[in-house]
Image (tube, helix red, strand yellow):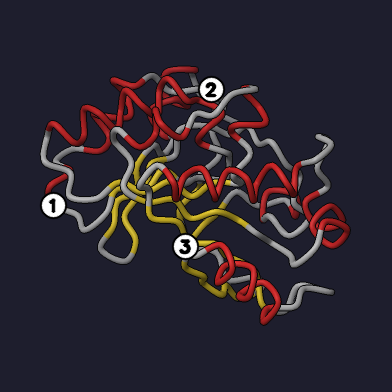
Amino acid sequence: MTKVSRRQQQAEEILAYELHGNLYLNITYHCTLRCAFCPKFQGSWEVQNYDLLLTREPTADEVLAAAGDPARYREIVFCGLGEPTLRLDTLLAVAEALKARGAKHIRINTDGLANLVYGRDVTPELARWVDSVSISLTAQDEATYDRHTRSKRAGAYQAMLDFARAAKLGGIAVTLTAINGLEGVDIAACEDIARRLGVNFRRRELDVVG
């Protein structure tokens, strides 16, 4: 077997990929949660034929180079198979630069646990450059949420809901998501939570990624 050099390996890693008229940015492989339904915990890092496995954390300059002209896309979305807010400084630097280059709309797909991770409210920092967030509500109650996300952090479910409230208060458009077909998940109850919070809701389908 031919040995692949570190430089070749890095060159092959996908930092930006196109789907649905949007550009998605893959900036980390680390996660706050260990969701049982995530492809990577089923042995695959592939999303819509894109291999999103990273072996390192790319720099802001590398992500921007991979992004190209942001004005070409409806949305720029921070979303890989890791939690983008775990690289908050890089995310903010890239988002600011993309806005300066003509990005129309910037979204983050997130677990909503950034405030819990950093021990402070980061939504004012995000609101400077981020237009919307899609937050994984996952389930209608804490027990079902914990069973599927396998969170190692106490209070994750409530922290996620508090993040959604803070983001909305800060002027960021918020959408909560839950997966139809995931055992024990009541989609109607999830939608009701979003309605009570005054945010949007989107139903996802089990095993449909991207």
Residue at 65% from the left image edge and 36% from the top image edge: 31
- What x and y, as percent, mark residue 79? 46, 46
Give the residue at mark 3: 48
Mark 1: few/some/many CA within 10 Å (<14, 14-19, 20+): some
Q: Nearer the viewer, residue 11 or 21?
A: 21
Mark 2 burial class by Cα count in 10 Å: few <14, some 14-19, many 20+: few
- The kind of residue on which mark 2 rests is Arg
Which residue type carries mark 3? Answer: Gln
Percent coordinates x, y for residue 172 in the rendering: 37, 48
Cα distance in 3D space between marks 3 and 1: 20 Å
The residue tagged 1 is 72
Instruction: Where is residue 196? Give x, y as percent.
Output: 59, 68
Image quarter hosting the N terminus? top right
The mark tally for this picture is 3
Of mark 2 and mark 1, the one earlier in the sequence is: 2
Look at mark 2 in the image and give the residue it sits on: 56
Q: State whether residue 148 is above or below residue 10.
A: below
Q: Residues within 10 Å of mark 3 (few under 14, many from 20)?
A: few
Separation of marks 2 and 3 at Cα, in angstroms? 22 Å
Helix or strand or loop: what does disc 2 sit on?
A: loop
Q: Quadrant of residue 129?
A: top left
